[in-house]
Image (spheres, helix red, strand yellow):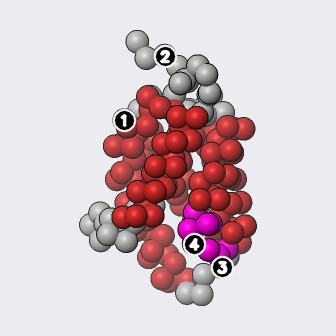
Amino acid sequence: MRGSRPGAAAALALTVAFAVHAALGASLEIAGCRPNLAAAALLVVCMFSGPARAAGFGLLVGVLEAGYAAGLVGSYIVSRTLVAYVVGSLEARVFRDSAAVAAAIVLLGTLALECVFAIFAPPPSALSWVLRTGGTVLANGALAPLLYFCLRPVASDREES
């Protein structure tokens, strides 16, 4: 599958991550914080993609999340695509074979996703947004090492030795 369709396995993994998030998102909690599994998986996959492929993955997740939310379509698509592109641009510059680096990228990337989304769709209450976003950032950071080890074989274009 890796040789015939580059990125197809990663796109399928992102679709599965979104489906799990959509089905179980309300009941998933880490110390009272709700992770965004689709966003965390997107950021991990983008660590192993170039900017163009990462932007495509961001578009995919943005469309899936916008379709599920049934509102603010452009805000979801733009925020996911833009941040995925930036993380994909780091692919050649960052030591990516580390769960600690994945956690840092997911922490900062989730914060960037939420901030870009808030710019395009300002929240009614800044305090509740800060509390919800802080919880999501921490929960995604906690999930990052697990997602890193699960998604690295699918997302990496290098052969493992």
Vertical order, 50 against 67 (above or below): above
Q: Amino acid at mark 1?
A: Phe
Residue 3 seen in this snapshot: yes
Of badges 2 and 3, the one in the foreground is 2
Q: Amino acid at mark 4?
A: Ala
Residue 69: assigned label: 4
Residue 158: percent from left, percent from top: 52, 19
Residue 35: assigned label: none
Residue 86: say if magenta: no
Going from the N terminus, do you reach mark 3 or mark 4 first? 4
Going from the N terminus, do you reach mark 2 or mark 1 first? 1
Going from the N terminus, do you reach mark 3 or mark 1 first? 3
Residue 122: assigned label: 3
Residue 92, quarter of picture: top right
- The CA distance from mark 3 to mark 4 is 16 Å
Check whether the beta carbons of the residues at disc 2 and disc 1 lie within 8 A of each other: no
Q: Amino acid at mark 3?
A: Pro
Vertical order, 69 against 82 (above or below): below
- The CA distance from mark 2 to mark 1 is 15 Å
- The CA distance from mark 4 to mark 1 is 29 Å
Residue 159: assigned label: 2
Q: Secondary structure at mark 2?
A: loop
Seen from this angle, which residue lies furthest left?
A: 31
